[in-house]
Image (cartoon, rainbow, N blue to C red):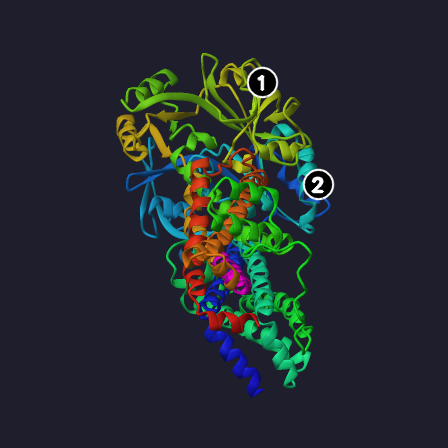
């Protein structure tokens, strides 16, 4: 044991930098995997907790007031019917902020989908104008218990009694109205009613919706929402962050394992004589294997323990969403198990790769095997074999011998060089993918029109303002380019199992500029473009005809293009307002999509339009989905650092192996007249050539892989493929040059030291 420890201590002193980088890389990998686990838990648990505690409904149906809701209780699979509750659409204002809401009348606290109070109290008959707000709506209105809300244009006011969490779809400005619970007397003119269904088998949701709509009649049902939609919306970008972290964490773990495997293999080749001596003095093959195995497992354990400790002690203090995610995750039941399992799994993987490489050390014979004699053809000093025709031509063309011999040394050791290039290319490839993710997010921020958001503002006008007057008022602002009138309707898909958004935006003379990833714009009557989420939901493609139902009126549209749709999970079909007026000539615009001049501040323009509208306009800035991905930039930067550390480990290994293998040629190179600087250039050229080949592979394969991964994620989220942006050729070229230059700089110092070694030292190293 003492000899084993002395050997490990000696090896650590010799390779302190490599050991440090391995510990840091392991810490970064484990931290990435722990953050991914935390984000997955954070994405799923809050909504699931609310849904379970509130006994949430699996289906919500918005119907006409006359719909016979009592019949739904007789359906097979329906455990409980909540409601019907009278509803009315309204707008609430507080502290200069307006929000579209759904007033829901309920005499008592519901038993199914029971709102969970977070502050204040529930409705009370002694306060007829009291309301309870859904928590996200309360945050948007900056309102809490005791505050007074106004209903613009009515002269009424409401008092906030409490704030509650709900498992239903949450408030999204311009997309989903906020939920407000009130006494039935506070909903004087209900325009509809809402019914909740709790099912015995949640997996039968689609079938239950279809039967419920058939029973009530499709004309009586205006909107359907399910628990799957609410869960997906609540998870939002947190799940995407978790997927990105998990993907890169696993990729970095594989790269680190390969780097450790290569480092041990190179070290074994460089210490064959020492290992033979160990066996000669009594070390068994198992003891030799354990020396390498325990040493690298100790490095991995140190890094994994450091990452787990920091995540536990300081993770919740990270500002922003990551800190919130870790704080919530630390309170989950499986937190302790994950905190132990993830580091242990990482250490076991590194241990497995270490064991495979260390096994070769156990096979080294106790008596050094003499080097094979040279073949009949003389070997060129500094090269691994006879010079190739290209190398001889380069020497004849007076290319510096150091460059020729350095490149030839790499090219002739094909299997070994290919393994080194592959191990180095993997972290570089992942860096290219990470750079592509950064570039895509940056494009989202700089050019929102490229991801389906050409409009910066969404404006809702009340019924007291005519369409012509509303457009004139909006286009009067000097920074408004265009105000496209439109309407958004809830439509039932064929089979009546889900609700989609049917939009009519723009008119024939002034079409709305949709962002298309496939097909062409809708020009003729009955033509439309659709999001990826809708195509997947209906299992249709561009070129197909689809039929949907709006109220009791069918609408048949020809899909001629696929648009990038970041809203409503891509379950959107869009056409012109004139096309929708073919079925309903009296259809009037209810919203306006406002495009602004480049550089205009949407917040300032929104404030001016709100003031100019004198209470008739409800103006919202369009939410950019990239805003929720802002934490991903810091994550990507951290992952690039971790991957760079792994690449650095592989480079140090390659440099050490090249220097040691060049020691036996040192005497010959000096004998033929090469100076120490030229001998140094041989090693530097060999290392730079390896880095250049790895960088070329990483850039050639990394860019299409990144595009495929990003587009696959966009398609799975409903936004659709076509959103990926890879780094520019200039940036990729700069990245490759940086990798090659860094590799050459790292190799320069150890190569120079080796070239200046005394002849006696060199002779002892090769004997």
Could you tell me which residue is drawn at 62 percent across and 39 percent down?
69
Q: Which residue is mark 2?
A: 207
Determine if the magenta segment contains residue 361: no
Could you tell me which residue is drawn at 41 percent across and 45 percent down?
137
Q: Can residue 430 be seen? A: no
The local crowd at label 2, few if under 14, some if 14 to 19, many if 20 or more residues have their Cα within 10 Å, is: few
Q: In the image shown, does 89 or 307 lie closer to the viewer?
A: 307
Q: Can residue 464 be seen? A: yes
Give the residue furthest to the right: 76
Q: Which residue is mark 1?
A: 527
Q: In the image shown, does 78 or 124 lie closer to the viewer?
A: 78
Main SS, magenta residues: helix
Find the magenta span and give its range: 646-666
Residue 261 position, x and y percent, is: 60, 64
Distance of label 2 from label 1 (alpha carbons): 30 Å
Could you tell me which residue is drawn at 69 percent across and 48 percent down?
203
Residue 609 position, x and y percent, is: 29, 28
């Amino acid at each position: 044991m003492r000899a084993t420890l002395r050997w490990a201590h000696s090896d650590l002193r010799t390779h302190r930098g490599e050991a440090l980088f391995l510990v840091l890389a392991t810490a970064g990998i484990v931290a990435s995997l722990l953050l991914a686990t935390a984000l997955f838990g954070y994405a799923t648990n809050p909504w699931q907790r609310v849904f379970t505690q509130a006994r949430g409904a699996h289906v919500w149906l918005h119907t006409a007031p006359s719909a016979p809701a009592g019949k739904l209780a007789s359906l097979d699979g329906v455990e409980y019917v909540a409601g019907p509750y009278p509803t009315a659409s309204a707008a609430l204002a507080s502290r200069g902020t307006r929000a579209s809401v759904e007033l829901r009348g309920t005499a008592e606290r519901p038993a199914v989908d029971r709102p969970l109070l977070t502050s204040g109290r529930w409705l009370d008959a002694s306060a007829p104008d009291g309301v309870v707000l859904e928590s996200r709506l309360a945050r948007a209105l900056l309102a809490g218990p005791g505050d007074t809300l106004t209903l613009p244009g009515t002269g009424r006011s409401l008092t906030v009694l409490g704030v509650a969490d709900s498992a239903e779809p949450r408030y999204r400005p311009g997309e989903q109205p906020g939920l407000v619970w009130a006494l039935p007397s506070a909903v004087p003119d209900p325009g509809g009613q809402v019914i909740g269904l709790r099912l015995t088998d949640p997996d039968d949701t689609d079938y239950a919706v279809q039967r419920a709509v058939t029973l009530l009649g499709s004309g009586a049902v205006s909107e359907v929402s399910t628990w799957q939609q609410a869960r997906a919306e609540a998870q939002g970008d947190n799940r995407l962050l978790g997927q990105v972290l998990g993907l890169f964490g696993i990729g970095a773990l594989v790269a680190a394992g390969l780097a450790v495997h290569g480092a041990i293999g190179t070290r074994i080749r460089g210490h064959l004589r020492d290992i033979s001596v160990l066996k000669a003095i009594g070390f068994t093959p198992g003891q030799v294997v354990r020396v390498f195995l325990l040493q690298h497992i100790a490095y991995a354990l140190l890094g994994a323990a450091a990452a787990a400790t920091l995540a536990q002690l300081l993770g919740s203090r990270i500002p922003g969403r990551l800190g919130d995610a870790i704080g919530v995750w630390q309170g989950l039941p499986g937190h302790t198990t994950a905190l132990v399992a993830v580091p242990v799994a990482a250490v076991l993987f590194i241990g497995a790769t270490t064991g495979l490489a260390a096994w070769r050390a156990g096979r080294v014979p106790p008596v050094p095997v003499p080097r094979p004699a040279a073949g009949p053809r003389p070997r060129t000093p500094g090269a691994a074999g006879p010079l190739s025709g290209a190398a001889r031509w380069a020497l004849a063309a007076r290319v510096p011998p150091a460059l020729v011999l350095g490149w030839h040394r790499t090219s002739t050791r094909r299997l070994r060089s290919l393994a080194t290039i592959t191990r180095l290319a993997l972290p570089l490839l992942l860096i290219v993918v990470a750079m592509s993710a950064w570039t895509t997010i940056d494009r989202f921020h700089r050019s929102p029109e490229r991801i389906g958001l050409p409009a910066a503002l969404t404006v809702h006008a009340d019924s007291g303002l005519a369409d012509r007057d509303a457009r004139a008022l909006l286009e009067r602002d000097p920074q408004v380019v265009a105000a496209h009138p439109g309407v958004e309707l809830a439509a039932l898909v064929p089979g009546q199992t889900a609700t989609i958004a049917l939009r009519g935006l723009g008119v024939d003379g002034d079409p709305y500029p949709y962002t298309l990833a496939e097909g062409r714009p809708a020009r003729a009557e009955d033509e439309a473009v659709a999001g990826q989420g809708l195509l997947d939901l209906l299992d249709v493609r561009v070129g197909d005809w689809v039929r949907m139902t709006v109220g009791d009126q069918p609408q048949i549209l020809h899909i001629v293009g696929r648009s990038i749709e970041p809203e409503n999970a891509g379950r959107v079909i869009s056409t012109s307002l004139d096309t929708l007026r073919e079925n309903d000539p009296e259809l009037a615009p209810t919203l306006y999509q406002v495009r602004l001049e480049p550089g205009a501040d949407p917040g300032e323009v929104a404030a001016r339009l709100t003031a100019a509208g004198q209470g008739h306009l409800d103006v919202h800035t369009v939410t950019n989905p990239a805003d929720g991905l802002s934490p991903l930039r810091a994550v990507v930067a951290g992952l690039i650092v971790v991957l760079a550390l792994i690449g650095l480990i592989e480079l140090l290994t390659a440099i050490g192996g090249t220097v040691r293998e060049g020691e036996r040629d040192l005497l010959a190179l000096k004998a033929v007249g090469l100076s120490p600087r030229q001998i140094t250039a041989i090693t530097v050229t060999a290392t730079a050539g390896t880095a250049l080949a790895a960088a070329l592979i990483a850039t050639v394969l990394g860019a299409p892989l990144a595009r495929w991964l990003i587009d696959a994620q966009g398609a799975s989220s409903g936004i659709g493929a076509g959103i990926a942006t890879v780094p520019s050729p200039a940036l990729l070229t700069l990245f490759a040059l940086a990798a090659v230059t860094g590799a050459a700089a790292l190799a320069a110092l150890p190569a120079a030291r080796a070239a200046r070694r005394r002849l006696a030292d060199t002779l002892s190293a090769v004997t």
